[in-house]
Image (cartoon, helix red, strand yellow):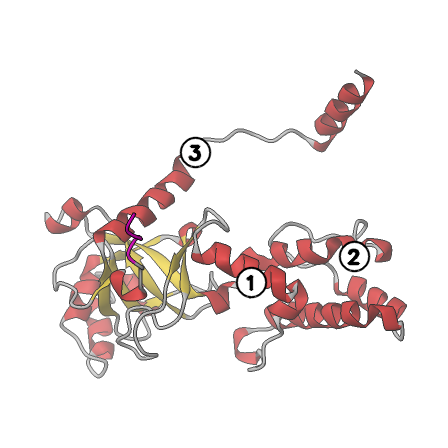
Amino acid sequence: MPSAPQIEARDFYKNMPSLNHETGDIWHNLPGFGLPNKVTVTGIVISPACDLSQKKTETATVIPIIPVSEYLYSKAFYGEVWNEVFNRLKPYGAEEHPPADRFSHPPIHLFEHALKSIEGDKKQIAFHARLTEYKKYIEYTQAPLNERSIDRPSVELILSEKRYGEILKKIFCNSFKSDIHFFPAYGSLSNFAAIPSHSVALFRYVYSIPLEILDAAQCSRDEWWSEDCKRMSLTAPMIEHFDACPLKVSTLKDDFLSDMISRYLGMFMRLGSRDFTTTSLDNFIKEIKEL
């Protein structure tokens, strides 16, 4: 049997996006609103094609895209880091002092206690290094954006080289989490590259932008943008969040676009139900044991 053709990053993106609005348009310089810890983000339009072409909508629905290197330091990843060291921290109070939820860090005193307890233990040198790096990770992610060090703590050191590689591969294959979608890097590190570095779309951070703003951006330039913002301040107040002129750089090709949208819809269309309480689960376990 002939082997399947190898897929490359260039297969994902159109080199010449249309001047008309299309589903799958990729824009740079969109506001991040501080949610994914980015001042500006790349974004992909997911509004239905018919709504855009027939002007049935005055807004474009956008999913923000951030580099994987940023995602690893976002709240969405805190739980993954904690899960990797939880068992090793049990002797030092991990069960009594866990994070408030999967988007929070454990208290810093837990690490101070653990580090003090294993200080000088030659058998714990590697674990001591992991905990020290985890403590730096917490301090780094809790610092204001403008005060963060250029040198980031190593997520690989915290997780281990093997586990770090496993998680990255799952991200690349869209099998890590249902609320993110991978975009391979394509193009040099410039303002005109479709996706300058390996990135993920954040399904839970979707928002809408008035098409008036994107229409103006199509005809504007950086040196004109401040005047355009003043002109649209009354009709499109959201313009105050656009510090730079948005730039359409590419459009995601149809087969990859349909895959992303089906995953996005699948995440939100599941109805789900309330979870059992901890007490109920404990009772179920007791009943099974009694049998």
**Residue type beneath disc 3:** Arg
Q: Amino acid at mark 1?
A: Gly
Residue 88's tag is: 2
> Distance of mark 1 from mark 2, alpha carbons?
20 Å
On screen, residue 82 versus residue 48, left or right, reads right
Residues at marks 3 and 1, CA–CA distance in whole angstroms: 30 Å
In the displayed orientation, state which residue is furthest to the left.
Answer: 54
- Is 175 inside the magenta-drawn segment? no
* Residue located farthest toward the front when viewing the structure as drawn: 1
> In the image, what residue occupies the spot 11% across and 50% down?
53
Magenta span main SS? loop
The x and y percentages for residue 201 are 39, 57
What segment carries the magenta color?
A: 1-5
Say which of marks 3 and 2 sits in front.
2
Amino acid type, residue under disc 2 in the picture:
Arg
Q: Residues within 10 Å of mark 3 (few under 14, many from 20)?
A: few
- The dot on residue 270 is 3
Instruction: Return the residue nearer the eye: 147 or 137.
Output: 137
Q: Is residue 142 above or below residue 288?
A: below
Q: Nearer the viewer, mark 3 or mark 1?
A: 1
